[in-house]
Image (cartoon, rainbow, N blue to C red):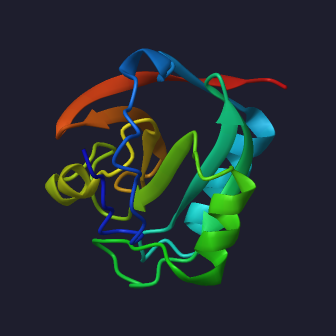
Amino acid sequence: MNWRSRTCGLERDDKRRYNQAMIPATLTISRPLYEQLVAYVLSEPAFEMCGLLAGQAGIVDRVLPVPNALQSPVVYRMEGPEFAAAMVACDFEPLGIFHSHPAGPPVPSPTDIAEAAYPDSIYVVISLQNTSVSVRAFRIVDEQVSEVALTISST
């Protein structure tokens, strides 16, 4: 099975198989990292903002912002040296991939689902649609979406 991401242009090894059992049932992010993530998204609220989440066993230890190469309010693409540096920082295995929806709900769009190329990663969608920010996490495997619990810890 060959996974090619239209959003980042990287290919997965044909022999690499994802393991749904390895995807954690809960994504945990500390309050400071959550606030960093939200602040980054709010820094350019008119555009979809994006990046990677590094960590292990469902615990985020770094937020790795990557500029949206498309500078669009409805679609994102990660590429260039910032994306390469973020991928290296998470050993080419991001725990999560995040992006914002400036005017949409906190769920993956049809485009997000069609372009989801990392079945081992958790997709985090941050909605700015309402007055308060709404953040949700999902697994997207073979265009099937299921929600992952998101926990914000105090430390």
Q: Image quadrant of residue 6?
A: bottom left
**Vertical arrangement, residue 72 with respect to residue 11, above or below:** below
The answer to whether 10 appears left or right of 107 in the picture is right
- Quarter of the image containing the C terminus? top right
The residue depicted at 54 percent of the width and 76 percent of the height is 44
- Quarter of the image containing the N terminus? top left
Check the image and name the residue furthest to the right.
Answer: 155
Residue nearer the viewer, 27 or 2: 2
Q: Image quadrant of residue 124?
A: top left
The answer to whether 93 appears left or right of 154 in the picture is left
Q: Position of residue 23 (x, y in %)?
A: 47, 23
Callout count:
0
Q: Position of residue 80 (x, y in %)?
A: 56, 83
The residue depicted at 33 percent of the width and 25 percent of the height is 147
Q: Position of residue 48 (x, y in %)?
A: 41, 69
Q: Image quadrant of residue 18?
A: top left
The residue depicted at 19 percent of the width and 60 percent of the height is 111
Residue nearer the viewer, 86 or 110: 86
Q: Position of residue 145 (x, y in %)?
A: 23, 32
The residue depicted at 80 percent of the width and 41 percent of the height is 32
**Vertical arrangement, residue 39 with respect to residue 142, above or below:** below
The answer to whether 98 appears left or right of 39 in the picture is left
The answer to whether 4 appears left or right of 47 in the picture is left
**Vertical arrangement, residue 74 with respect to residue 129, above or below:** below
